[in-house]
Image (cartoon, rainbow, N blue to C red):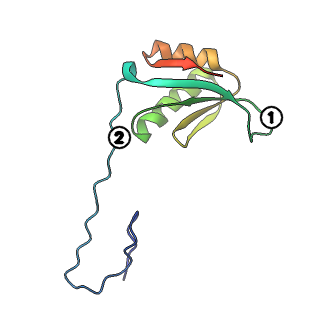
Amino acid sequence: MSKKHRNSGIVYSTNPDFEYRDEQENIAETLPPSQQKLTIHLDKKQRKGKQVTLVTGFAGNADDLKDLGKILKSKCGVGGSVKDNEIIIQGDLREKVKQLLSNMNYGCKISG
C-alpha cells in the first residue's frame, strides 16, 4: 500500500531499498515577549462590515500563538480565532489589547 507523505510528491516507489526520510520540520522557536514586535490594527474587509482587531507579527510556533490568542480572547471577554498567523478578536478592542500585551511585556503598537 502506498502512503502519500505530506509535503512531498512521493506516492510509490518501485525501488525495494527505498526508505522515505521525513525531513525534520523547522519548528519555529518562539521569541521572548520582550523581543516580539506585534502590530494591532482594525479590519473590516470581507467581514460584512463587522470590525475585528487583528494582532499580527508574532514570531514563534503555532501552539504559543494559539495560547496567546486564547488569553486575549478571555481577558477581553469576546470571541475570536487564530488563523494565518494572526489573532482575530471580535470588535474594536485595539486599546485594551495593547494594554494587555504591554502588561505581558510584548512589544506592540497600534497601526492604522
Residue at 37% over, 74% down: 10
What residue type is disc 2 on?
A: Ala
- Dot placed on the residue nearer the N-terminal end, 2 or 1: 2
Instruction: Name the residue rendered at 73%, 37% in the picture.
Output: 45
Name the residue type under label 1: Gly
The image position of residue 24, as x and y in percent, is 28, 54
How many other residues sit within 10 Å of disc 1, few (<14), some (14-19) or many (≥20)?
Answer: few
Secondary structure category for the residue under label 1: loop
Residue at the location (44% across, 41% down)? 62
Q: Name the residue under label 2.
A: 28
**Which quarter of the figure is the N terminus placed in?**
bottom left
* Residue 61 shown left or right of residue 92 in the figure: left
Rendered residue at 38%/18% (across/down) = 34
Judged from this view, the residue extending furthest toward the right is: 49
Which residue is situated farthest in the left direction here? 17
- Quickly name the residue at label 1: 49
The x and y percentages for residue 81 are 59, 38
Is 2 drawn above or below residue 54 in the view shown? Answer: below
**Can you say which quadrant of the picture contains the C terminus?**
top right
Question: In what element is the residue under mark 2?
Answer: loop
* C-alpha span from label 2 to label 1: 34 Å
Compared to 109, does 90 lie above or below? below
Q: Residue 66, image x and y in percent? A: 48, 36
| Quarter assignment of residue 88 | top right
